[in-house]
Amino acid sequence: MIAACPGSGKTTVLRHRANHILMQSPRHRIAAVTFTVQAARELSERIASTVTSAKGRVQAGTFHSLCLNQLRQAGQHPQILPENHARQLVHRATKEIDSSIKVAEAQAFIDRTKACISPSLASAPVPYREIYQRYEELRSDRGSMDFSDLVREAVLGMREGRVRPLSVTHLLVDEFQDSDEVQLAWVLEHSRLGVQVSVVGDDDQCIFAFRSALGYQALHRFKEATGAHQVTLDTTHRCAGKIVEHSGALIAHNSERLSKSLTTSNREDGSVQLLVGKDLVHEAAMIVDRIRASRQPERTVAILARSNHLLDGVEAALLGAAVPYVRIGGQSLFETRSAALLTGLLRAIIGESLLGIDHALSEAKVPTGVVDLVHGHVSRHGGSALALGNYSGPGHPALDNLRERIAPLTSQAAANRSNLVIYGIEAWLNAHVFKSKPCPVLPHCVKALVSLSGSLAQRIRAAELSEKKHDPDAVRIMTLHASKGLEFDDVWIYAANQGALPHESSLIEEERRLFYVGMTRARSNLVVTCTAGVQSVFIPEAKLATSL
Ligand SMILES: Nc1ncnc2c1ncn2[C@@H]1O[C@H](COP(=O)(O)OP(=O)(O)OP(=O)(O)O)[C@@H](O)[C@H]1O
C-alpha cells in the first residue's frame, strides 16, 4: 500500500511498479484500475512504451469496464443502462412516488445505497425507500444493470464462485482513496483469490465523500484485511517549502488520516499570502489587478474557488480587465442562457440580428402566435428593432414594455451610450424573464460588458471570444474539485469565506481536504483571499494570518 502526499509522483510510481512486475517474469500479467477512461488509456500507453514485452500482458480500465469483462467471461452479458438513461429512470421514479422530493436528492440517495454491497433500506425515510425500489423495478424491467450493479455483481459472483477474478497475477489500483464500499470489496476479493494487489492513494486528497468515497477508511481497511506493507511517499516534488508548511498545518486538523510528515525536493521557499477584501467584487478585482501587474510569460497561474457560481464573478473581472483566461470544467459566462438573452437583445438594438427579440419574448412567456406576429411585423417594416414601437397586434405585458423601451434604447445606442443600453436591457430581463427568481449570472455578464471599452458590437464580440482556449499563458479558472491532479506556478484561492469554504452543507473534514487540495496545486506562490469579517476557519488553521 503506497500512501502518498500531493506532488509525490504517484502515477509515475505506479507505472514504475508495473514495469518492474512485468520485467520480473514473463508469466506476470497486470490489471491497472483507474477512475477515468482517459487515465486508463494514458497508463497503459506509458507502460507499453517502456516495456516492449508488455503487449497482451496489461489491461487497464475503470472498475466498471474490468467488471464487465469479468461478467462476460462468466457467460453473463448484462445490458448496461447508460448514465443519462439511468437519470431519466430516477426522475420518473421520483415523480411517481413523491414529486416534492428533489430529483438530485433522490439520485444521491440511490447512489449512496448502491455504493454498499448489501444495501439496507430499513432506516431510510419511506418515500426515499419507495423511490429506490421503483427505480430498481424500472431498471430490471428493462433487463439492464447500472454501473454500480456491475461491480456488486462481480463481487458477489467471486464470493459465490460463479465469477472468476481477472486472469492476472497483479492488480494495481490508482487513486485508491476514492473507492467506495463495493469497489473496496472487489479489490479485497482479488487479494483473497491470490492476486497480488498494490494500491496507491492519498487519504488527505479524498474529496468525493459525497459520492461515497471511503478515503482514509479505504486505505486503513485494505491494510487491516490484507496485512499489506505500507510505503509512504512523503516527499513532494511540486510544492515550495512555505506551501508545504502552511498546507501541512491545515490538514493536521483532520482527525481521521494516516500520519505523514511531508518534505519537499523543491528548493524554493516560495510564498504564501493572505489578502483581505471588502467584499467579493473587491476580492476578485484585487486578484485580477495583481495578476495583470505581475504576468510573466510561461508562468502558469490558476484561480480556484469553491463553486462555479463564485467563478462567475472572477470571470467577469478578468474579462473586464482583458486578462486572457480559460474556464476549466464549467460553463463560461457568455455561454449561458442569460448571456444569450442579453446579447441577443443588444444585437437586435444595434441592427445585427432580430432573432434575440423572438428568443427574449418566448422566454418572457409571450404566446408563440404573438411572437410570430411580432416577427412578421418587424420583418415587413425594414427589419429594424425600431419597428417594434409601432406594432399594434395582440399584446402581452412583456411585449408592451419592450415596445415602449425600444425607441429610447435605440437612440442611446446610436449616441454610443452603450452602458445605458446594457442596463436598460438588464432591467427588462429582470422584470419580465427572471421576475421573482433573480438570475445570479446576469449581473456578472452586465458587469463584464460595462467594463469593456468600444462600441456595443465590439464589446459583445470581445465577451463572446473572451476565453483563450489555446493560449498556454491564459489564467486557468476552475473549482477546487476540478483542480485535483493539476499543478501551477501560482495559485489563487478566491473567497475563503465562512459559509462558502467550508461549505455549510458539507462535512468539515471533507472541506478541509478540499482546501488542502487547492493549496497543494501551487509550485511556488499561493495567495488566499477572503472578505473581512467572514474569514474561513481554515485561514487561522493554515496559519495564514501570521504569514503576512
Ligand atoms: N521522482 C521525481 N523527481 C522529480 N520530480 C518528479 C518526480 N516524480 C514526479 N515529479 C514531478 O513532480 C510533480 C508532481 O508529480 P505528479 O503530478 O505526478 O504527482 P501526484 O502524486 O500525482 O500529485 P497529486 O496527487 O497532487 O495530483 C510533477 O511536476 C512531476 O513531473
Image (cartoon, rainbow, N blue to C red):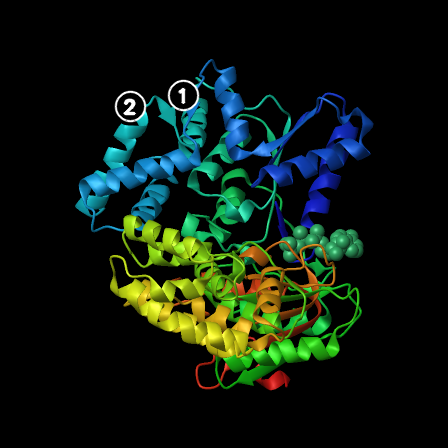
Q: Is residue 511 left or right of residue 228?
A: left
The image quarter containing residue 51 is top right
Q: Earlier in the sequence, mark 1 or mark 2?
A: 2
Q: Is mark 1 within 8 Å of ligand 1?
A: no
Compared with 88, 496 (above or below) is below
Q: Is any atom of residue 28 visible in this view?
A: yes
Residue at 42 percent across and 22 percent down: it is 79
Q: In the image, is 393 to the left or to the right of 116?
A: left
Q: Which mark is residue 160?
A: 1
Q: Quadrant of the C terminus?
A: bottom right
- Residue 33 appears at what percent x and percent y? 59, 36
Q: Which mark is residue 141?
A: 2
Tell which residue pokes out farthest to the top in this image: 75
- What's the residue at 28%, 23% (across, down)? 141
Q: Secondary structure at mark 1?
A: helix
Residue 189's label in the rendered image is: none
Residue 504 position in % (x across, y down): 37, 68
Q: Calculate the distance from the C-alpha at mark 1 to the C-alpha at mark 2.
A: 25 Å
Along the viewing direction, whichever of 537 and 157 lies nearer the viewer:
537
> Quick check: is the Cβ at mark 2 less than 8 Å away from ligand 1?
no
Compared to 510, does 201 lie above or below? above
Q: Position of residue 489 (x, y in %)?
A: 72, 66
Left or right of 318? Residue 292 is right
* Residue closer to the observer: 459 or 239: 459
Mark 2: amino acid: Asp
Amino acid residing under circle 1: Glu
Task: List x then y, in percent, for residue 176.
Answer: 55, 45
Q: Residue furthest front?
A: 381
